[in-house]
Image (cartoon, grey):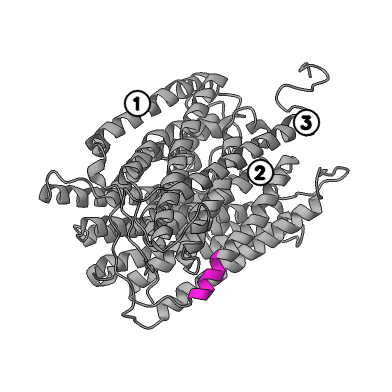
Amino acid sequence: MALEEPQQKRQLGHDEFDPVGTLALIGLYFLVLVAMWLFMYFVEFLGNDPTVVGSLVTGGVV
Amino acid sequence: MSTYVERFPAEAKVIRSAFYVSFVSLAIGALMGLLQTLHRTGVVEVFGEPGTYYTVLTTHGVFLVIAFTIWFLVGVFVWAVTTSLDRGVENLRLTWGWYGLMSFGTALAGIAILAGFVDDWPVVGDISADVLFTFYAPLQAHPMFYLGLAIFIVGTWIAGADWFRSWWVWKQENPGERIPLPTFMVLTTMLMWYIATLGVAVAVLAFLLPWSLGLLETVNPLLTRTLFWFFGHPVVYFWLMPAYMMWYLLLPKISGGRLFSDPLARVVFILFLILSVPTGIHHQYLDPGISEGFKFIAMTNTMFLLLPSLLTAFTVVASMEHGARQRGGEGRFGWLKALPWGNPTFTGMALAGLMFAAGGFSGMINAGMNINYLVHNSFWVPGHFHLTVGTAVALTFMAATYWFLPQLTGRKLFSRPLALVQVVLWFVGMTFMSNAMHRAGLLGIPRRTAEPWYDGFEFEAGVGSVGELNIQIALGGTLLTLSVAIFLVVVIGTALNGKSSEIGANAIPEPLSGPEDSPLVLDNLKLWTVIAIVLVVLAYTLPLASIIDRGGLLGPGGRAFPMSLDTLVVLAQLATEGALSR
């Protein structure tokens, strides 16, 4: 069998095809990104002293 | 419909030859990857002296991201142009000409790097190019390295001209027709490449090569860094755009569907053309000689660059879904089961896309100006680019090879199950290695260090331990090497396999929304090129002027490392003695 031979059961044209599955997956990815950003907040600001503005205790002096 | 090799036998030979150079480079680069992983994680102390580590690191970087990727993509571009215009190359001798030039350049640069494994060569003395893929000053390579690189890039320029010529001749014969999508992708990618390589051409020809020849005493390190990153960031899109091309052209077809939208695909490639280059300074957030405002502009451009990747995620996934639904897939997530997971080309590319989604996240962290400080020059960064170039690109290229080789040779794929194991193994290995690298970077473990062992100091992991991270990295690296070995077995097995009449046709299905739906202005390559150049001028003129103003063209100087002029001195002596004895 050739590699790219698909087993098509029906033909879907432009107007009949509604990519709801794509929307669901991309929505999921968006949620993962938000969760990861939240996680980075903990890594950056709560896990360690802030690396950019100095220490929280010294109010950015050091 | 015929296979590619039946329709274009001469061009198929060019593409095969390009692929084979690419695969040899992959084999060499991957072997160096294994050595490094084992050394860095302390599993085996491979290198006695630190210098060897950097020779290995340079070989790994340059052979994989310059040779493996670019040799593969020139092959893919020949396929894309000839298939979509349905005409052979205009002049086969010219095509073999750029092939020869690229080969010569690869050989020169490759020899200069590999020669670094031996300290002192008879007659010619010391040759080395331990300058890493990011070959800016003050690291200095043997002139042969820079020369090889320059010749290689000129080869790619001529290759681009060859494809533009094909399109030009086709256009004369087909007035008023839209540029076929695959050719459009090649042309926009090459326009981006022409702009991007100007930076490296100036860095190499005006500064690094004369400097390594001893014609210039000093160079301005910040200037060569900035010129390098002028090229060094867009080069990632030079790797990525052909991978995207495979996702747009092959994935829908193999999924059993059609590309969702031709206009969206064009928009994506135009966005890459105009936004890829004016972003390089985001690699220099920690460089003290560039002011924050310029860095902010680079960051803004970089964030815009997420747009074409997110558009691609939508278009490619929607095209796959279209295929799955035509194959009978149902439900919000149920359609995923209807995809051809048994096909190594599909599974490899789909997994590569999935990993790229993860790489997108770590890329956003890298691109953010303040949060970049957290991960800059740490193990996080190789963790990131092993997801992008190391998987999104490399795994896509390997998976695409399983479709291309039968098309290019007329031979059946050696072993489909083995190929499937290979792509899955890559995904698993990279999950271990890259995830652990990201975590190690957050602990502050540095990248590019030959001696990752310290006295009286230990990195502390919040979760797990450094030992656990090391085991994951070593395990991941070993699985990846095994995966490359299997890939090479399948490639060699296919090249030696019997001819088959069961190979599918070399055809790309029509998109659901075709070129007739895309505005004509999208095909106005001149307009997009001008916009791209204007953006580059805006992003780079002031930073470059300020760098030159402060340090001078030939810069505050500094000692080059390592000095590699011995060879030239010896050769000059030999030449003089030869001339005198005559």
Q: CA distance from mark 3 to mark 2?
A: 19 Å
- In the depicted view, which residue is nearer to us: B287 or B103? B287
Farthest residue to the right: give it.
B456
- Asked if residue B252 can be seen in this view, the reply is yes
SS class, disc 2: helix
Question: Is B249 a magenta residue?
Answer: no
- Asked if residue B125 can be seen in this view, the reply is no
Q: What residue is drawn where x is 33% and y is 46%? A: B261
Judge depth for marks 3 and 1 and give the one in front: 3
Q: What residue is drawn where x is 46% and y is 47%? A: A20
Q: Badge 1 sits on which subunit?
A: B
Judge depth for marks 3 and 2 and give the one in front: 3
Amino acid type assigned to the residue bearing label 2 in the image: Trp
Amino acid type assigned to the residue bearing label 3 in the image: Leu
Placement of the C terminus of chain B among the 4 image quadrants: bottom left
Residue B307 location (% of width, % of height): 45, 36
Q: CA distance from mark 3 to mark 1?
A: 42 Å
- Labels 3, 1: one chain: no
* Relative to A58, B230 lies left or right: left
Q: Please give the residue where the numbered disc 1 appears in the rendered image.
A: B534
Residue extent of the magenta highlight: B416-423
Q: Badge 3 sits on which subunit?
A: A
* Relative to B21, B444 lies left or right: right
| Rendered image: mark on residue A46 | 3
Provide the major secondary structure of the magenta segment. Answer: helix
